[in-house]
Image: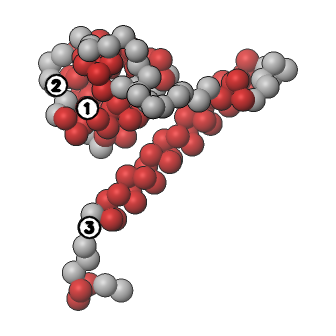
Amino acid sequence: MLNERLKIARNNAKYTQDDVAEYLSVIRQTYSAYETGRSTPDAKTLNALAEFYNVDVNYLLGNTNNPTPPGKQKVHYPHMIDTSDFSEESKKELESYIKLLKLRDRVKKMNTDMEANTEIAPGLQG
């Protein structure tokens, strides 16, 4: 069930396996193994995937059919921005840009988290 839900979540979010692998800092083959069921992500990775896809971990595990995380409401940008007069190409570009911004914010958050958890040796501070 987990491997199927991972593939569904990725396709719904319109990410490639390479996109997700980059987010997780693993090679594509590692992530591909999660989707094919050849390997199972550890708890930390599973939580990272749920956050990345903005879904409930229990949805990924098959414990619920509701993907929305408890206490979170998905934001659908097309409902906030009137795209009715956009060409299909412009709509796709907007969607790609939003994905890029989301990925950038996730990377920034990961860097901030890593910096908060890393102590610099006193003699190496600049």
Above or below, comparing residue 7 to residue 95 in the picture: above
Residue type for callout 1: Leu
Q: Residues within 10 Å of mark 1 (few under 14, many from 20)?
A: some
- The residue at 37%/40% (across/down) is 23
The residue to which callout 2 is attached is 40
Label 3, secondary structure: give it: loop
Horizontal side of residue 42 vs 120, given as left or right: left
Q: Which comes before the other along the chain, label 3 or label 2? A: 2
User: Which residue was labeled with disc 1?
Assistant: 46
Q: Helix, strand or loop at disc 1?
A: helix
Specify the amino acid type for callout 3.
Answer: Thr
Q: Nearer the viewer, residue 22 or 68?
A: 68
Q: Alpha carbon of mark 1 to alpha carbon of mark 2: how far?
A: 9 Å
Residue 29 image-quadrant placement: top left
- What is the quadrant of the N terminus in the image? top left
Q: How has the structure been colored for display?
A: secondary structure
Name the residue tied to disc 3. Answer: 118
